[in-house]
Image (tube, rainbow, N blue to C red):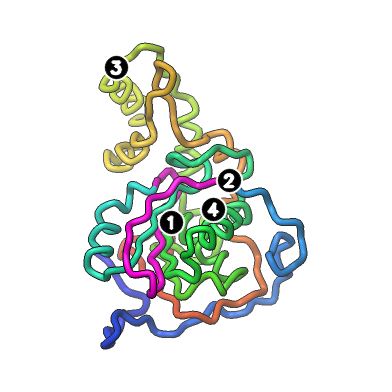
């Protein structure tokens, strides 16, 4: 079940979002804001998949959530590329999927990666669509670099602290505790990891999602997500950096009807 915070409007030129903006809040600006003059963080070269389309229209850019990867959007990216004729980009965040590992897993670091990638690919400004952690990344980029974001979609997330509604810290700890012996087959490795995770996570769908991160490397199965970095930054990931900027562009919040992340 999905409920819409705002609805799409269909105009002759295509889908249109109502104009909404983040309101200003009386807090100090983030010290790492692109407008504050602080030294920019070092970016990493993100892994991505770009579906070709009409260069004259803003591309659709998808950002996944915690423990996810760009492959989460394979079906919807292909469908939207075919239906809209636009370029569609799916991206692996740092420490996820095929992107490099880094000890820095802050939102400021993640938006620095995008600030480098989007202009490099000629995709700025874009329609930026982020789910969960990717939604917070998208919102922060829109707030700090609005010229890169033609319009914004935040899926099942809002720009607030979500620590109290998440089991992610326990998931990270459970995954770190799993040690899979060398030369174990893929099926045996998955069964072993699933059995160990099941003591904490009863939801089969959640375990299956986490197990998409189990990959073979150098003759043994390991987690491709950087669990050390996630463990160090998980509270920061579940929070949202304080901001004073506002984003004036069209914005849509798309919420799950039974969401634990948006009240």
Q: Quadrant of the C terminus?
A: bottom left
Circle 1 residue: 63
The residue shown at (54%, 81%) is: 248
Query: What secondary structure is the stretch in magenta mostly built from?
Result: loop
Q: Quadrant of the N terminus?
A: bottom left
Indicate yes or no whether the magenta region holds residue 86. Answer: no
Question: How far is disc 2 from disc 3 in space, using C-alphas?
Answer: 32 Å
Q: Which of the marked residues, 2 or 3, is nearer the chain's N terminus? A: 2
Residue 246's image quarter? Answer: bottom right
The residue shown at (44%, 30%) is: 223
- In x, y percent, where is residue 261? 43, 59
Question: How far is disc 4 from disc 3 in space, using C-alphas?
Answer: 35 Å
Q: Nearer the viewer, mark 2 or mark 1?
A: 2
| Labelled disc at residue 44 | 2
Circle 4 residue: 238
| Labelled disc at residue 185 | 3
Q: Which of the marked residues, 3 or 1, is nearer the chain's N terminus? A: 1
Contact flag, marks 2 and 3 (Cβ < 8 Å): no
Question: How far is disc 3 from disc 1 in space, using C-alphas?
Answer: 32 Å
Question: How far is disc 4 from disc 2 in space, using C-alphas?
Answer: 22 Å
Residue 215's image quarter? Answer: top left
Q: Which of the marked residues, 4 or 3, is nearer the chain's N terminus? A: 3
Q: How many marks?
A: 4
Indicate yes or no whether the magenta region holds residue 63. Answer: yes
Q: Which of the marked residues, 4 or 2, is nearer the chain's N terminus? A: 2
- In x, y percent, where is residue 25? 64, 76
Q: Nearer the viewer, mark 2 or mark 3?
A: 2
């Amino acid at each position: 079940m999905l409920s819409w915070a705002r609805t799409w409007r269909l105009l002759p030129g295509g889908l249109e979002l109502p104009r909404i903006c983040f309101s200003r809040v009386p807090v100090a600006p983030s010290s790492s804001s692109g407008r504050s003059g602080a030294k920019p963080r070092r970016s990493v070269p993100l892994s991505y998949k770009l579906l070709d389309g009409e260069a004259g229209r803003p591309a659709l850019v998808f950002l996944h959530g915690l423990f996810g990867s760009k492959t989460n959007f394979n079906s919807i990216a292909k469908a939207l590329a075919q239906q809209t004729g636009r370029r569609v980009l799916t991206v692996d965040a740092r420490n996820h999927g095929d992107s490099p590992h880094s000890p820095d897993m802050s939102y400021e670091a993640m938006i620095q990666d995008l600030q480098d990638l989007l202009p490099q690919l000629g995709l700025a400004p874009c329609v930026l669509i982020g789910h969960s952690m990717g939604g917070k990344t998208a919102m922060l980029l829109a707030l700090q670099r609005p010229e890169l974001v033609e319009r914004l979609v935040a899926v099942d997330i809002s720009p607030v602290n979500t620590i109290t509604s998440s089991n992610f810290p326990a998931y990270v700890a459970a995954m770190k505790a799993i040690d899979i012996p060398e030369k174990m087959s893929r099926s045996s490795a998955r069964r072993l990891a699933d059995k160990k995770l099941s003591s904490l996570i009863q939801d089969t769908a959640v375990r299956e999602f986490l197990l998409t991160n189990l990959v073979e490397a150098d003759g043994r199965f390991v987690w491709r997500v950087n669990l050390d970095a996630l463990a160090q930054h998980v509270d920061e990931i579940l929070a949202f950096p304080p901001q004073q900027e506002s984003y004036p562009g069209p914005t849509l919040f798309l919420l799950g009807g039974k969401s634990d992340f948006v009240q």
